Amino acid sequence: MGNYIYRNNKIIILEKNNLIISKKLLEKAHKDGIEKNVVRLVVKENNAILMLKRAKNERFSDLYELPGGKLNENEDIFSGAKRELCEETGLSIKEFTSKPESYDFGAISDNKKYRGYILNVLCEKKDIILNPTEHCEYKWVIDHEVENLPMLDNIKTLIKKFF
């Protein structure tokens, strides 16, 4: 059996395969000279994507971003995704509904090579509770709103793929 199943024309990653998929991707990143790995999550509701606005005291304050962040040392992609989403929003992931899609970027803050993994997720329904040290508000954004929302260009480019 493969790493994925299809339900209602969506890919669902089988939980038992999360570690296998993550290990392959992180090993490739290491071979490619990547120094840090991050996850970004596309949380959709009624054709809108959840965006978080950075807090005033944070780097890139007042810019919007997808939920996510850096993986901890020895953390797999899927565990990191669950941890980051919970820390930032209080939401919990029910299912991963896409294969991890990778993108590379250089960080201005530390001049390191980063690889990001972006995943579509289905969350358990509950209220969003932001971590105020990281984010000051959230917004559900539809496709035509993306262009006018303040965010880094690489995030804007990524988001457009998911509408």
Image (cartoon, rainbow, N blue to C red):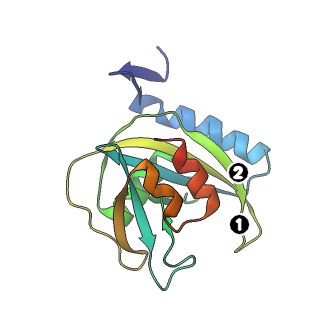
- Quarter occupied by residue 25: top right
Q: Where is residue 26 in the image (x, y as percent from the top left)?
A: 65, 44
Tag on residue 107?
A: 1
**Residue 36, relative to residue 17: is it above or below?**
below
**Vertical comparison of 59 with 144: above or below:** below
Q: Determine the residue positioned at 54% across, 41% down.
A: 161
- Depth order, front residue of 79/60: 60
Measured as percent of width and height from the top left, residue 104 is found at 70, 51
Identify which residue is drawn at 32% across, 70% down.
130
**In this orientation, does residue 152 appear?**
yes
For residue 6, what is the image quadrant?
top left
Q: Residue at x 49, y 23 (%)?
A: 3
Q: Is mark 1 on a helix, strand or loop?
A: loop
Foreground pick, 105 / 37: 105
1 and 2 marks in contact (CB < 8 Å): no
One can see residue 75 in this view: no
Figure check: 147 above or below 4 = below
Rendered location of residue 159, percent (x, y): 52, 49
- Mark 1–mark 2 Cα distance, whole angstroms, equals 10 Å
Mark 1 neighbour class, 10 Å CA radius: few under 14, some 14 to 19, many 20 or more: few
Determine the residue located farthest toward the bottom in the rendered image: 57
Which residue position is annotated with label 2?
104
> Which residue type does callout 1 highlight?
Ala
User: In the image as oriented, which residue stretches furthest toward the left?
Assistant: 126
In this rendering, would 128 be left or right of 161?
Answer: left
State whether residue 51 is above or below residue 29. Answer: below
Count of numbered tags: 2
**Where's residue 86, x and y in %?**
34, 59
Label 2 amino acid? Asp
Label 2 element class? strand
* Residue count near mark 2 (Cα–Cα under 10 Å), binned few <14, some 14–19, many ≥20: some
